[in-house]
C-alpha cells in the first residue's frame, strides 16, 4: 500500500537562486523567507521534545506527556488533548494499522511504577539504581485523539533516549529501535551499554510488545543517539555519539551493528546526534549537536551539519547557521529534507538559532535560503525539532511550544504530499529528476 501520495512539483526558474534580501523583523524576531503561520504555547512550563505526524494528526511530545493536534480543524480548535504522562524525553513516533493509531514514546528517566502509572510531575522520577524504576518504550492507542489509552510499557535496558520505527509486514509486526545513551548504571542498565534494544510490536496485539534482541554496537562511547533508516535501500545512518555509522538492515531484527558497512570519525564533530537521507538515497546529512557554546558562530567547526555522499561516504562540505548573539547556545539538532523536485532542501533546528531552510542542491556549497529565530513574545527560540510536512514547517520549541511556519520561496507548489511522517523512518524512494519537477517512477524492489 502506498504511504505517500505524490504531487507533481513545478519549480520556477527563478528558484535557482534566492535573491539577496535583508533580514526582516516581527517585533525583534529575526527572519527571512519564513513567517509564523500559527502557534500553540504551553501554559505550564514544560520541556518540549519531538514531533510525529499521521494524516491530519500532529503529536508533540514534552517531558510531562504529549499534546495531540488535528490540523484539519479551525486554528482555535486544533488542540485536541493535553495528556500528562511524565517520562523524559518523551520523543514520539506514530503508526496506524487497520484504523488503529498507535503512539510510541521514549522514556529515558526511570519512573516509579511507570509500567502502570502516568506521573503528572517530576515526583515520579527516580534513579537508575532503583530496581523499581521503569524506562523504555510506552505505547498508547490514540485512535480517539481526545481519549488516549495507555496500552503497554516495555522496559528496555538503560531506557530509550529516542526511537526509530521499522515496519516488518512479513511478520505482521513493527520493530522499534530504542536507542540508549546512558552514562550511569543500575540493575536495569549495565555500563557500558553499547547496545540497541529492539522491541517487536505485534500489530494486531500491541499490548504483547516485548524486547526480542539487543545487538551490540562496535566502538562507540555508550550507544547511538538517533538512527535514521532509509527503507528503500535497507540502509541505516546511525549517529553513535563518537562516530557516524552505516548499517545493513536487510534483516531489521538483526541490523549490522557489529560489522557496519562504514564508520565515519571526524574530530571536528563534537557529538553525532542525528541524520537525514535525501529522498533519492544519494546523500546523507549528519548533525552535530555539540556541547560547546560559541554563540552560533558560523566559523567554528562544532555544532554543524555535515554533507556526505552515500556511495563512497565522501565528505563534501559542512554548514552552520548565521551568527547569533554570543550568549545564545547553538547546535544542529533535529530536521528533515523537503521532497521537492530537482533540489535538495533541508530543514534544521538550531536551539537558540531557531529554524532554518538550507539548499544543498550543490552539496559542496550549501546556502541558507530562509530562517526564523524568535526573540520575544513567548520567549526566545530554543528549538528542539523542526520538520517539513505537507507544505509547512512544524517546530517544537523547548519553551515556546509548537510553532508552525510558512516558507516564502518562489516554488509552486512546495514539495510532495505525505501520508505521515516519522522523521527517523524514511519509507519511500523519490528518484533523481529528469527535469525540474518531473519524477521518474520508483523501481520495483
Image (tube, rainbow, N blue to C red):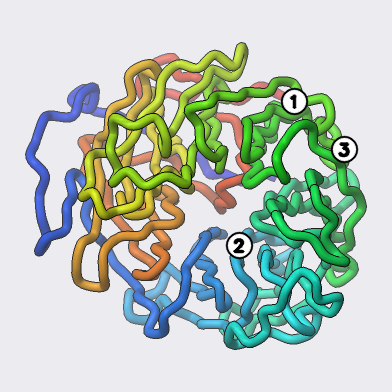
In the rendered image, which quarter is residue 99 located in?
Answer: bottom right
- Say which mark, if any, is on residue 445: 1
Along the horizontal axis of the image, is 412 left or right of 254?
left
Q: Is residue 203 visible?
A: no
Query: Which image quadrant for residue 362?
Result: top left
| Comparing labels 3 and 1, the label whose residue is closer to the camera | 3
Mark 3 and mark 2 residues within 8 Å of each other at the beta carbon: no
Q: Give SS at disc 3.
A: loop
Q: Quadrant of the C terminus?
A: top right
Looking at the image, residue 30 lies above or below residue 375? above
Q: Which residue in the structure is indicated by mark 3?
A: 254
Q: Give how far apart the Cα atoms at labels 3 and 2 are.
A: 23 Å
Q: Is residue 109 visible?
A: yes
Q: Is residue 272 above or below residue 437?
A: below
Q: Residue at x 85, y 72 (%)?
A: 207
* Label 3: few (<14), some (14–19) or many (≥20) C-alpha neighbours in 10 Å: few
Using a 10 Å C-alpha cutoff, classify the residue at mark 1 as few (fewer than 14 neighbours), some (14 to 19) or many (20 or more). Answer: few
Residue drawn at point x = 64 percent, y = 73 percent: 87
Q: Which residue is mark 2?
A: 92
Q: Position of residue 26 (x, y in %)?
A: 11, 60
Mark 2 or mark 3, which is nearer the start of the sequence?
2
Amino acid at each position: 500500500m502506498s504511504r505517500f501520495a505524490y504531487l507533481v512539483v513545478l519549480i520556477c526558474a527563478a528558484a535557482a537562486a534566492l535573491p539577496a534580501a535583508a533580514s526582516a523583523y516581527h517585533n525583534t524576531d529575526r527572519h527571512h523567507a519564513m513567517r509564523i503561520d500559527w502557534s500553540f504555547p504551553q501554559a505550564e512550563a514544560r520541556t518540549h521534545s519531538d514531533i510525529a505526524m499521521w494524516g491530519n494528526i500532529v503529536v508533540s511530545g514534552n517531558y510531562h506527556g504529549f499534546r495531540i493536534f488535528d490540523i484539519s480543524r479551525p486554528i482555535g480548535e486544533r488542540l485536541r488533548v493535553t495528556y500528562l504522562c511524565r517520562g523524559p524525553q518523551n520523543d514520539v513516533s506514530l503508526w496506524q494499522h487497520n484504523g488503529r493509531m498507535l503512539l510510541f514514546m521514549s522514556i529515558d528517566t526511570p519512573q516509579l511504577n511507570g509500567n502502570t502509572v502516568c506521573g503528572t510531575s517530576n515526583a515520579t522520577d527516580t534513579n537508575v539504581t532503583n530496581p523499581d524504576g521503569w524506562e523504555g518504550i510506552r505505547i498508547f492507542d490514540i485512535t480517539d485523539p481526545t481519549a488516549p489509552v495507555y496500552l503497554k510499557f516495555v522496559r528496555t535496558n538503560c531506557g530509550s533516549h529516542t526511537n526509530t520505527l521499522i515496519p516488518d509486514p512479513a511478520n505482521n509486526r513493527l520493530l522499534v529501535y530504542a536507542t540508549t545513551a546512558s552514562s550511569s548504571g543500575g540493575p536495569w542498565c549495565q555500563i557500558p551499554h553499547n547496545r540497541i534494544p529492539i522491541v517487536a510490536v505485534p500489530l494486531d496485539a500491541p499490548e504483547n510488545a516485548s524486547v526480542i534482541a539487543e545487538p551490540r554496537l562496535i566502538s562507540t562511547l555508550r550507544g547511538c543517539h538517533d538512527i535514521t533508516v532509509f527503507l528503500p535501500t535497507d540502509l541505516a545512518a546511525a549517529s553513535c555519539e563518537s562516530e557516524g555509522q552505516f548499517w545493513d538492515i536487510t534483516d531489521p531484527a538483526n541490523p549490522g551493528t557489529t560489522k557496519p558497512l562504514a564508520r565515519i570519525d571526524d574530530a571536528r564533530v563534537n557529538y553525532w546526534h542525528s541524520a537525514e537521507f535525501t529522498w533519492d538515497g544519494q546523500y546523507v546529512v549528519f548533525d552535530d549537536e555539540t556541547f560547546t557554546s560559541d554563540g552560533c558562530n558560523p566559523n567554528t567547526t562544532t555544532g554543524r551539519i555535515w554533507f556526505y555522499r552515500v556511495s563512497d561516504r565522501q565528505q563534501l562540505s559542512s554548514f552552520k547557521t548565521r551568527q547569533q548573539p554570543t550568549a545564545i547556545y547553538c547546535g544542529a539538532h533535529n530536521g528533515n529534507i523537503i521532497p521537492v523536485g530537482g533540489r535538495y532542501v533541508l530543514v534544521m533546528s538550531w536551539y537558540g538559532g531557531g529554524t532554518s531552510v538550507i539548499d544543498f542542491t550543490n552539496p559542496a556549497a550549501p546556502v541558507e535560503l530562509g530562517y526564523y529565530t524568535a526573540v520575544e513574545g513567548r520567549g526566545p527560540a530554543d528549538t528542539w525539532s523542526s520538520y517539513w510536512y505537507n507544505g509547512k514547517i512544524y517546530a517544537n520549541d523547548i519553551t515556546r511550544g509548537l510553532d508552525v511556519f510558512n516558507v516564502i520561496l518562489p516554488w509552486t507548489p512546495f514539495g510532495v504530499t505525505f501520508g505521515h511522517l516519522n522523521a527517523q523512518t524514511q519509507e519511500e524512494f523519490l528518484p533523481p529528476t529528469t527535469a525540474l519537477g518531473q519524477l521518474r517512477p520508483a523501481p520495483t524492489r
